[in-house]
Image: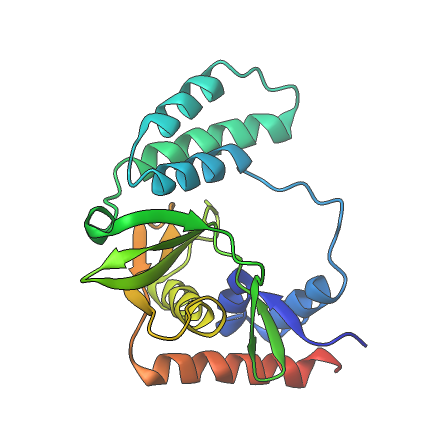
Amino acid sequence: MSSPKISINQLAEFHSATDASKKRIIKNQQSPNKFLLPWYQLPKARIKKCIELRGDKSPIEEAMKLLENKAPQNDRQRIDKQVSIEALERFVTMRLPSVLSEIGEYMTIKPSKKFLEIGEVEVIVAPEVVIKGRLNNQVVYGAVKIHISKNKPFDFTKATYVATTIKKYLEAEVAQENEFVIPDLCICLDVFSGRLVKASTESRTFLEIENICNELNRLWDA
């Protein structure tokens, strides 16, 4: 049997899932559907670009025009277009953290390692945007995970788990000695809940995440 691994979003879902749903999540992680087409690729890509450009909304405006002119060929495309437009409309009402404009030497990077080991579980973090820059004469990092799900938006607790895991990932796998991770810039951006939730600095939050991973590990081979 393979070693336990889970995506960061599914880890958040696992926290409050029923026993049946936990089994389903584990089964899907053990045997992922390689042919499953991802939803809402355009809005996610353009939101990512907007953050990379420190809040420039022009990629969002361009995406809206593309979607409005797109003619769906089937029900899946029709739903994708409708929800994608709604996602972008909601995103433009959200306010990005002011610290984005305060960072000097701002750049986005692509770390080679996409996961964080918590206990015996490999948590696939893979933030859409990883930010590096300078603040108060120090090298600093942050990252954003974008969540677009109209039917299953994250509540505050789930979003906090995602943001806090991002913080731990950056500290363990990206930041070097004498470089710092900014909790306020470790963000779970959930479009349909309208939340931008930052990482918790309370030790009990990561302890709860470790407990989720321990439970996942116990159930993995069950």
In the image, taking residue 57 as reference, residue 148 lies left or right, namely right
Q: Nearer the viewer, residue 27 or 44?
A: 44
- Quarter of the figure with the N terminus: bottom right
- In the image, is residue 65 above or below residue 123? above
Q: Is residue 144 visible?
A: yes
Percent position of residue 25, x then y = 64, 66
Colour scheme used in the picture?
Answer: rainbow
Q: Nearer the viewer, residue 168 or 208?
A: 168
Q: Is residue 194 visible?
A: no
Residue at screen point 35% across, 61% down: 141
- In the image, is residue 151 above or below residue 40? below
- Quarter of the figure with the C terminus: bottom right
Residue at screen point 29% across, 65% down: 182
In the image, taking residue 129 as reference, residue 180 lies left or right, namely left
Residue at screen point 42% across, 17% down: 65
Residue at screen point 56% across, 72% down: 18
Percent position of residue 60, x then y = 37, 29
Q: Nearer the viewer, residue 97 or 21?
A: 97
In the image, taking residue 150 as reference, residue 57 lies left or right, namely left
Q: Nearer the viewer, residue 49 or 17?
A: 49
In the image, taking residue 113 as reference, residue 219 lies left or right, namely right
Percent position of residue 170, x then y = 43, 67
Across the whole image, how many numbered discs are drawn on residues? 0
Quarter residue 140 falls in: bottom left
Quarter residue 168 falls in: bottom left
Residue placed furthest toward the right = 1
Percent position of residue 184, x then y = 26, 62
